[in-house]
Structures are given as C-alpha cells and as structure tokens.
C-alpha cells in the first residue's frame, strides 16, 4: 500500500519536472535576453560619447557567448507558455538562425573595435546594432 503511494508520488514529481524544465528554458532565455538588453543600454553612453571603448570588451564577450547559445535556447515545444517567441522561430528556423549569425558577425566587429580602442569604429558599428541586428530578428520572430 505504502509502496503504491510512493510510486504514484514519484510519477507526479516526474510530470511536474517536465513542465518545470520547459518553463525554465523560457524563463532562462528571457532572463538572458534582458541581460543582453542591459548590456546594450550600458554600452550606449560610452559608444555615443566615443569614450574608452576598451572597457566594453567584457560586455561584448558575454554577449558573444550568450548569443552563440541562442538557438539551443529555443528547443522544439518551447513556443507556448510565458513567451513572446513567434511560431516562425520553429517554422522558419533557417531564417531565425541566420539572423542570429548576422548579429554574431556584428558583435565580432564590435569586439575588434573595442580591443583596438577604436572609438570611432565602435560607435559607428554600435549605432546600427540595435535596429538592424537585434531588431532584424525581432521583426520576424518576436511578438510585440
Ligand atoms: C535571432 C533572433 C534574435 C536576435 C538576433 C535578438 N533577439 Fe531579442 N528576442 C528574440 C525572441 C524570439 C524574443 C522573445 C523570447 C521569449 O519571449 O521567449 C526576444 C526577446 C528579447 C527581449 C525581451 C526579454 C523579456 O522577456 O523581457 C529583449 C530585452 C531582447 N530580446 C533583447 C535583444 C537584444 C539587445 C538583441 C541584440 C543585441 C537581441 N535581442 C537580438 C529574438 C532575437
């Protein structure tokens, strides 16, 4: 008798675990994207003022590392729940991944400029990053 209750309880825990794992993937990617947005905001005044862009390199590195993991953070089945990801993330996967690759290319440009302390090159690249490379994906893959 006791044994059967235990087995039922374990089954329930396993089910809850699956639901939790799916919720986690959405919550974790949203937290990460918020962090990416915070990086962009923190970078803006330095980039606009053509300040010491060398100090921005750690932020760019964190962005590169995070966006490399971006496709894995949208596994099949994670399009429902507390998410603004559009179904196109999965139905037009190649375009989604290409948009991410384009952003990674732009982050490389920013990293090179930051490492060289080239404020003019950094500022010019930064000024188009949000609208062109972040927004370029949001327009097709994120609900407003
Ligand atoms: C390849 C596509 C893609 C690229 C590139 C991209 N995003 Fe997003 N972004 C998304 C999707 C999809 C969502 C919705 C995620 C969700 O709700 O599950 C999102 C959501 C967000 C959010 C909202 C997070 C929240 O839930 O509060 C922020 C902030 C954000 N992105 C910032 C950025 C910034 C900054 C960049 C560029 C440096 C960027 N994104 C580049 C696809 C992208």
Image (tube, rainbow, N blue to C red):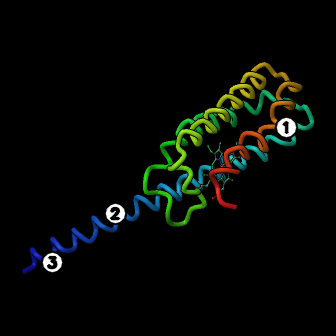
Residue drawn where x is 48% and y is 43% of the image: 72
Decide: few, some or many residues near mark 1? Use Cα within 10 Å; few <14, some 14-19, many ≥20. Answer: few
Depth check, mark 1 against mark 3: the one in front is 1
Q: Nearer the N terminus, badge 3 or badge 2?
A: 3
Q: Nearer the N terminus, badge 1 or badge 2?
A: 2
Residue 132, position as x, y percentages in the image: 77, 40
Q: Is mark 1 within 8 Å of ligand 1?
A: no
**Residue at mark 2:** 17
Residue 143 is drawn in which quadrant?
Answer: bottom right
Outermost residue to the front = 91
Q: Is mark 3 within 8 Å of ligand 1?
A: no
Q: Which mark is residue 127?
A: 1
Outermost residue to the top = 116
Separation of disc 1 and disc 2 at Cα?
A: 43 Å
**Residue at mark 3:** 5
Q: Is residue 24 left or right of residue 43?
A: left
Image quadrant where one finds the N terminus: bottom left
Contact? badges 1 and 3 (CB < 8 Å): no
Residue 30, position as x, y percentages in the image: 59, 55
Residue drawn where x is 69% and y is 34% of the image: 60
Q: Secondary structure at mark 2?
A: helix
Q: Secondary structure at mark 3?
A: helix
Image quadrant where one finds the C terminus: bottom right
Q: Which of 61/72 is in front?
A: 72
Separation of disc 3 and disc 2 at Cα?
A: 18 Å
């Amino acid at each position: 008798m006791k044994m059967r209750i235990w087995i039922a309880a374990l089954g329930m825990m396993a089910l809850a675990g699956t639901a939790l794992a799916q919720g986690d993937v959405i919550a974790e990617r949203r937290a990460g994207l918020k962090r990416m947005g915070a990086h962009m905001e923190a970078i803006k005044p330095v980039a606009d003022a053509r300040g010491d862009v060398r100090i921005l390199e750690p932020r760019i590195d964190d962005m590169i590392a995070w966006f490399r993991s971006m496709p894995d953070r949208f596994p099949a089945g994670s399009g429902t729940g507390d998410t603004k990801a559009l179904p196109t993330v999965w139905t037009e996967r190649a375009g989604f991944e290409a948009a991410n690759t384009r952003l990674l290319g732009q982050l490389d440009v920013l990293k090179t400029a930051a490492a060289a302390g080239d404020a003019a090159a950094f500022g010019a690249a930064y000024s188009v990053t949000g609208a062109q490379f972040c927004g370029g994906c949001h327009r097709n893959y994120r609900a407003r």
